[in-house]
Image (tube, helix red, strand yellow):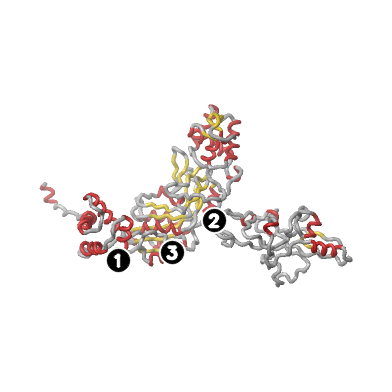
Amino acid sequence: MTDFTRRPPPGTGPSSLDTDQDPNRSITPLETPASPASPVFAPPPRPRAPAAAGVPLGGSQPPEPTRSRPAQSAPLPSVIFDPMPRPRVPPAQSAGVAPPGAPPPFNEEMLDVQTERRTAPPGPPPPQERRAPDAERRGGPEADRRGASPGGPERRGSTSAPPQGYVGPERRGFRRGEGSDAPVTNRFWPAQPKTLQEAGLNATFVEELVLKAIFFAGEMRGMDVATRLQLPTALVDEVIEGLRRQKYIDIRGGGGSGVGRSTMIYQLTTFVTDVLRQILDRNRYNGPAPVPFNEWVAAVKQQTVRGNRITRHRMQDKFGDLIIRDYIFDGIGPAMNSGRAIFFYGPPGNGKTAICQGMVNCYEGDIFVPHALLIDDFVVKMFDANIHRAVEDEPGMPSYDRRWVRCRRPLVVVGGELTLEMLDLVYTPEVKYYEAPFQMKASNGMLLIDDFGRQKVSPKDLLNRWIVPLESDVDILTLHTGKKIQVPFDVFAAFSTNLDPSDLVDDAFLRRVRYKLEVQRPDEEQFHEIFQVMCRKRGVPYDARAVDYLIDEHYRPNHRPFAACQPRDLLDQVIDMANYQGQTPRLEPALLDAAVRSYFVRFDKPASSTPTSASAR
């Protein structure tokens, strides 16, 4: 059985795990000593090729080749090496006091000691020891005996920590104003593809995208084609050159400054007419190159909305000017940490929708959303400018695949217009490509089904549609060919209704939606606070006596309940009436009375006519 126990670093004393080892034998550590962590915004480090070559993932490493030294050689100090050599630190950086446990730098006295050992009388043959595979390639046996790389004082087997701020191969990434001792964030970062194979596309598909881009534009420069496809210019130039050799496009002239194929202006030739007609009959998608479906699935899992650690302190300033009670925080906080679903219910106009809009601000960081997906040679548009809020790149940020868009976690709100057809892939026969459904665009974000129970579809059918995704985190979508595909349902779903929940939901739904929260009406004190906040936002002086007059004259005598939306609505009507009368908007009894008469209106049903009177007419 393979031993996966981490061995202690050198200099920490003997351990019970290696008492059976020869003290003169050099042991290759199973793990490289951890460097000080740093926040990176790059993909996970690549596997160490020298150590894992020819070894299946998760398997044990083959034994290192061993060599026997001549019998007359005395045993040399054991050398501990890193399977993946780090770049040598320049002498200017390595100067200074060595960290504790690090070997001393090489000097002439060490060479004299080793010379004396080589001239000592022959003794018993030393035990075999493991050596670095590239020891001879980096300077031969002499360099290996001396323990130093040619041209540098750093020892080959040094386990000392790198200098402050050094970013080696395993810690390469983007830092954003944080120290090197901050934790490493294992986040998704799409690497810029260097070949079409790395992009997951074939040359024929990219050629079709280039031809459609030039066809819809009339003529385009090479760099503009690359911008339209969001692919590196070098890849697009190769595709354009191949189309030129096929006589499908031709150079009309140069455009702009600079030299090279990317600055040339291209247009279609008459030889491409029949080919282009077949391409447009297949699909008319004209936009950034799509991302393979399996890559998006992996990205969704890595950017999951599950398992967050949102605390009360972190939520305090994420809801703007909303007046929220403590029980609201205590209810939505655990639900957001679970990432599952929450059900809001209560009377209308008390901020259920506004609370959901503030909840998405509690998720820190950003995610990557692809412009489009490629599923079985069909294109599915994903990025929606009305839903996804793009984030500007910071200076010094490393490059990434521009087929992805950095944006905030999305919030998708659907109301009474929702139908079952809108929850599946929407295929348009005219353009022959798909539009992603709402829940797919809300991946790694939040989906709010507002006014639940007022949709055109019955609540029972709508709940049956959500039961499987809420329980298994997998949604089933159907292509127009009849093929069904599984897509990840990594969405924090929220249901909001002002109807009686007992008439809408059943026990099966309540079991899958673990968190239920009633949003109650504000009391008189909160009513004053909301009025004060609205007056500040509208630029109207707040007058507590005027609000007391409103409550005493129009709420208590009529037993009218408070609602969180009423201060905003009444104040807007006061402002409109004051502007109409040519006055400065302010809280005064006359304007408040006029606003109440217009806002609170009851429509009583007229008395029904008797059959006799109806027949007499």
Q: Residues within 10 Å of mark 3 (few under 14, many from 20)?
A: some
Q: Residues within 10 Å of mark 1 (few under 14, many from 20)?
A: few
Q: Which mark is residue 523?
A: 1
Image quarter for residue 201? top right
Secondary element under disc 1, as helix, strand or loop, is: loop
Q: Earlier in the sequence, mark 2 or mark 3?
A: 2
Query: Quarter holding the N terminus?
Result: bottom right
**Residue drawn at the location 53% of the way across and 46% of the way down:** 402
Residue 136 is situated, as x and y percent measured from the top left of the image, at 78, 54
The reply to whether discs 1 and 2 touch (Cβ–Cβ < 8 Å) is: no
Residue 373 falls left or right of residue 54: left
For this rendering, which residue is in front, 610 or 295?
295
The alpha-carbon separation of the residues under discs 1 and 3 comes to 23 Å
The alpha-carbon separation of the residues under discs 2 and 3 comes to 28 Å
Amino acid type at mark 3: Gly
Task: Report the residue that reaches farthest toward the top.
Answer: 270
The alpha-carbon separation of the residues under discs 1 and 2 comes to 45 Å
Residue 592 falls left or right of residue 519: left
Secondary element under disc 3, as helix, strand or loop, is: helix
Residue 224 is situated, as x and y percent measured from the top left of the image, at 52, 37
The reply to whether discs 2 and 3 touch (Cβ–Cβ < 8 Å) is: no
Q: Is residue 520 above or below residue 253?
A: below
Image quarter for residue 207? top right
Amino acid type at mark 1: Asp
Residue assigned mark 2: 176
